[in-house]
């Protein structure tokens, strides 16, 4: 599937504005170049039989890309978007590391910097981050910047704490295989009021002893995945946990798949270890994209990616 680098070291949900969250809740083969035609593949399919085989690509309804093998039929291995699924990942970079990663900590609504954020690098098995890898205290400056050294093939997360934001847990998936310089790894932090707006827009209310997560799904071309779905290993009878997908930068409870941003998430997840699994419907049927396990903490937000993992 190629190098596991390049999955866009930026984790942005892209809320348009606080007021938009509080108040916001046909494709055509003849295209107006200045107008978005769709946000999800469902937008295209809803236009009728003529669009049954269309997918949403770069906000336009386009024929599903397939490659005809010599004997005819769809060859999933030659599909550039999903052909890597089921194949082992390419060998990791030979760079021994460690890698210097510049963090760019910003606000999810304003985009402004978050200074005075305390950062720890924690192994995945150290769920309470009692023994951080960094031995010196790391705090973001007034521009929201702080540099951290990450070991090769690192399996773990960043713990981000500040007086005005929810504690954040950022899981590296995949781990960095090279230095990350300017503009750096952008992580958009959230305040309690932002979470309140998010959950209210979903017809819910964040429960204090539960947490939430933001998820970004990628395809084999290392682009945000369109038409992907994800699920969590939670009790099917759990009436508090709510899944959502981003549609044009806003969280939508009734959306059924990712749009061109590849984003979604869950609110009111139980505070424990949670496994997330992403999948996509292709001409070859439903395919697993990737799986990852993260820690959900009460009153905290967890960030992660789901990428093709070769399974």
Image (cartoon, helix red, strand yellow):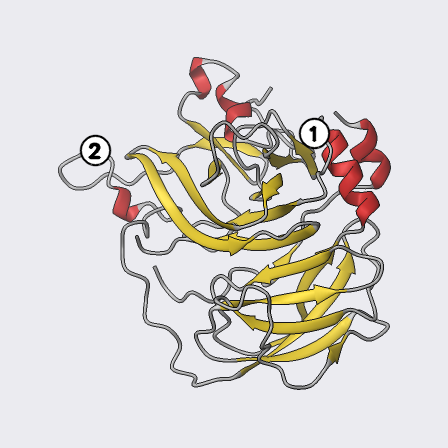
The residue under the point 31% across, 32% down is 283
Tag of residue 61? none
Select label 2 or label 1 by which is in front. Answer: 1
Kindly indicate the quadrant of the structure image that contains residue 113: bottom right
- In the depicted structure, whether residue 98 falls above or below residue 155: below
Which residue is disc 1 drawn over?
Answer: 202
Residue 122: x %, y % from top left: 57, 71
Q: Is residue 111 or residue 60 the one in the foreground?
A: 111
Mark 1, other Cα within 10 Å: few <14 / some 14–19 / many ≥20? some
Element at label 2: loop
The residue under the point 82% across, 41% down is 17
Element at label 1: loop
The residue under the point 82% across, 31% down is 22
Kindly indicate the quadrant of the structure image that contains residue 159: bottom right
**What is the distance, in whole Å, between disc 2 and disc 1 at their CAs?**
42 Å
Dot 2 or dot 1: first in sequence order is 2
* 174 on left or right of 244: left
* 165 on left or right of 227: right
Residue 207: x %, y % from top left: 70, 38
Residue 115: x %, y % from top left: 83, 69
Can residue 265 be seen here?
Answer: no
Which residue is disc 2 drawn over?
Answer: 73
């Amino acid at each position: 599937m190629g190098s596991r680098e390049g999955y866009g070291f930026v984790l942005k949900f892209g809320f348009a504005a606080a007021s938009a969250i509080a108040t916001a809740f046909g494709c055509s083969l003849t295209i107006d170049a200045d107008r978005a035609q769709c946000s999800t593949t469902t937008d295209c399919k809803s236009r009728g039989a003529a669009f049954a085989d269309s997918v949403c690509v770069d906000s336009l309804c386009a024929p599903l890309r397939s490659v005809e093998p010599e004997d005819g039929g769809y060859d999933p291995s030659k599909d550039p978007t999903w052909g890597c699924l089921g194949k082992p990942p390419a060998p990791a970079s030979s760079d021994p590391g460690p890698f210097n990663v510049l963090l760019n900590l910003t606000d999810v609504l304003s985009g402004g910097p978050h200074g005075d954020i305390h950062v720890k690098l924690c192994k995945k098995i150290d769920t309470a981050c009692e023994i951080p890898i960094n031995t010196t205290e790391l705090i973001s400056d007034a521009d929201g910047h702080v540099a951290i050294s990450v070991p090769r093939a690192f399996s773990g997360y960043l713990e981000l704490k500040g007086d005005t934001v929810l504690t954040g847990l950022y899981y590296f998936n995949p781990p960095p295989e090279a230095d990350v310089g300017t503009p750096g790894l952008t992580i958009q932090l959230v305040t309690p009021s932002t979470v309140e707006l998010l959950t209210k827009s979903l017809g819910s209310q964040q429960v204090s002893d539960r947490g939430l997560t933001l998820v970004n799904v990628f395809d084999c071309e290392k682009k945000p995945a369109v038409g992907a779905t994800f699920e969590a290993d939670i009790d099917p009878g759990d009436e508090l946990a709510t899944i959502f997908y981003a549609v044009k930068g806003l969280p939508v409870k009734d959306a059924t798949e990712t749009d061109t941003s590849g984003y979604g998430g869950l609110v009111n997840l139980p505070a424990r270890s949670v496994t997330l699994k992403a999948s996509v419907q292709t001409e070859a049927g439903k395919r697993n994209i990737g799986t990852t396990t993260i820690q959900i903490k009460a009153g905290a937000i967890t960030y992660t990616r789901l990428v093709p993992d070769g399974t």
